[in-house]
Image (cartoon, rainbow, N blue to C red):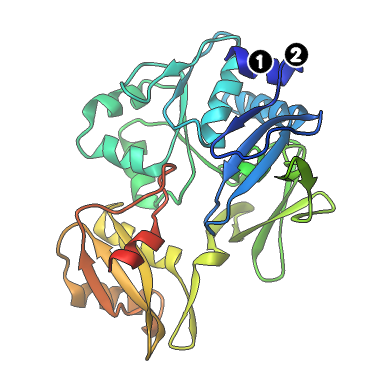
Amino acid sequence: MAALAGAIEGTGPALGFGSIASTEVPEEIALVVGTSGSTGDAKEVALTRAALLHSATESNRYLGAEIGDSWALSLPLTHIAAVNVLLRAYLLKSQPVDARTSHQPADFTAIVPTQLFRALNGDNELLETLIGMKSILVGGAALSDDLYQRASDRGVKIVRTYGMSETSGGCIYDGAALPGVTFTLESNGEISIGGKTLASGYLRAGQLDATNFKSGIFRTRDFGKLENGKLQVLGRVDDIVITGGENLSLDLVESVLKNFLKSEECAAFTVEDAEWGAALCIATISEVNKEVISNLLEESIGVHAKPKHFTVVDRIPRTSIGKVDRRQLGVNK
């Protein structure tokens, strides 16, 4: 926290979180966050003091957080969502609670859907901790409607967040942009974000490369739509596969599965196939009725969504932020 304060106040060096190769940054940069996104390509996201402070200030304001309120750190510090917890605590003049190894009470925290699932499926201590908080930010991966409703019914006060390292973390709360943030939908439905929380670009050998940030706008490579004026994120451009000549969203397949199975422990992935190009596979941690699942996906999405393979795994592999690691599933098929 002392080093973070120095970086934000300009009295100390910039800080790097995650895998960082750069050893120097432009003067206005306070933090650099290493991210591979969902493509596997390593990037170093450069964030200014102004962008970070705007993000943390507006997040605290949205939640009604006051000076002295506490934040619990529940995620690894290799990700912007965790760094933001420290920043929000810094602005509230409070010391963050380290809840990564034990459940400790606090007023606010940020978690991923996998942690929420575990709280509702056996981790009663975590569930009671979450129930006692004023608000819980949930982001990093898709939150199914079923999981959201189950948690809400138990008294967990959830705020759905959307954002990425390039936007200083979550900048759209419950489908609405925070003050100072804008978003638009391109003609193909891709989400673009602009405003005061945007990164300055990517660091390459200590120099800024802003080619992915056209005119102050970042194209997220996520698809979305407006529903009652609120942004609904549909999935990644990178998660659209072509199977049998038809486009198929793996995120949409998983959403249908999770709502039907009432479980987060399932995943969709593909393997190369001579007939289909990309053959849809379904991974679960227990046996499922393959005919029922096939019919469900065909009726919900289309005939091209009928799985070609089913596999049972000990666990669904995930990244440290809780997203399904589809590449690992494909390798282990």
Q: Which numbered circle lies on residue 252?
A: none
Residue at point 40% right, 62% down?
327
Q: Looking at the picture, does residue 142 appear above or below residue 171?
A: below
Mark 1: amino acid? Ala
The picture places residue 110, in percent across and down from the top left corner, at: 47, 31
State the image quarter where residue 305 is shown: bottom left
- Find the residue positioned furthest to the bottom: 275
**In the picture provided, is 147 more to the left or to the right than 220?**
left
For the point 57% across and 35% down, which residue is it? Answer: 80
* Mark 2 crowd level (few <14, some 14–19, many ≥20, 10 Å Cα): few
Q: Is residue 140 above or below residue 271?
A: above
Q: Which residue is mark 1?
A: 5
Q: Give left or right: position of 236 versus 149.
A: right
Please tell me which residue lies in front, 129 or 201. 201
Name the quadrant containing residue 10. Answer: top right
Mark positioned earlier in the residue sequence (1 or 2)? 1
On screen, residue 180 above or below 290: above
Residue 272, horizontal then vertical, whole percent: 39, 79
- Secondary structure under tag 1 reads helix
Answer whether labels 1 and 2 touch (C-beta < 8 Å).
yes
x, y percentage for residue 304? 39, 83
- Report the amino acid beneath label 2: Thr
Residue at image mark 2: 11
- Disc tally is 2
Q: Nearer the viewer, residue 314 or 156?
A: 314
Figure quadrant of residue 9: top right
Crowd rating for badge 1 (residues with CA inside 10 Å; few <14, some 14–19, many 20+): some
Identify the residue at horizontal 39%, vertical 54% (top origin): 324
